[in-house]
Amino acid sequence: MSLIHDVDVLLLLATAMAAKRRPAEALDIVAAIDLLQNNVPVADKLVDAFPRLTAAGLLTASGEGVQLTAAAEALIETLPRKVETPERLFALRQQLADWAAPAEAALAVVPAITVDALRAAILAHRAAAASSAKNLLVAKPKPAETTKRPGQRQRKPMPARRRKD
């Protein structure tokens, strides 16, 4: 790809997270983006990124959602696993800079996710975040300090030995 936008990298990684078992729908992609960077870009920017990634041969339409192509899955597989999200996004951006799209990828169909569908998904995700419902895509918070489990006591020290005179 020649010009790489931040939204392209974010959308590709979010689609990889959301499309594990089935094609990712708009709400799944929005939830994954929120998990990755705690901020969802404007729907217009996201919709503009779909044709760019499709033309590069990295996304394909599948029913009501999108999924990664085999080439995109290969890019995602080579990313480092045990690093923070910004480092993964940077590594993916470097890989996309070196990516050369195959010639037949330009004929690919643009995914069926529209601006209206993304706006509705963003509003639904914000409403779900405001409610008391549990979002399963959100990472569990880590405790600030290690606490002892309740009911676990430390062993009492042995009494001091007495001397026999």
Image (tube, rainbow, N blue to C red):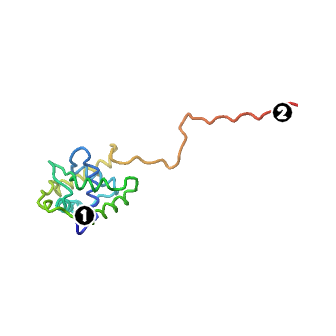
Helix, strand or loop at mark 1: loop
Q: Residue at x 21, y 55 (%)?
A: 118
Q: Nearer the viewer, mark 1 or mark 2?
A: 1
In the picture shown, does residue 138 fall above or below 93? above
Disc 2 crowd rating (10 Å Cα; few below 14, some 14-19, many 20+) is few
In the rendered image, which residue does mark 1 sit on? 99
Picture coordinates of residue 34, whole percent (x, y): 31, 54
Q: Residue at x 85, y 30 (%)?
A: 164
Q: Nearer the viewer, residue 96 or 109?
A: 96
Q: Earlier in the sequence, mark 1 or mark 2?
A: 1
Looking at the image, do the residues carrying marks 1 and 2 touch, with CB atoms under 8 Å apart? Answer: no
**Quadrant of image for the C terminus:** top right
Picture coordinates of residue 133, whole percent (x, y): 32, 43
Helix, strand or loop at mark 2: loop
Picture coordinates of residue 95, whole percent (x, y): 29, 62
Q: Residue at x 31, y 64 (%)?
A: 94
Q: Amino acid at mark 1?
A: Trp
Disc 1 crowd rating (10 Å Cα; few below 14, some 14-19, many 20+) is some
Asked where in the image residue 22 lies, by quadrant, the reply is top left
Q: Residue at x 40, y 46 (%)?
A: 140
Residue sticking out furthest to the right: 165
Residue sticking out furthest to the bottom: 3
Q: Amino acid at mark 2?
A: Arg
Residue sticking out furthest to the top: 164
Picture coordinates of residue 104, whole percent (x, y): 13, 60
- Left or right of 43, for residue 158: right
In the rendered image, which residue does mark 2 sit on? 163
**Quadrant of image for the N terminus:** bottom left
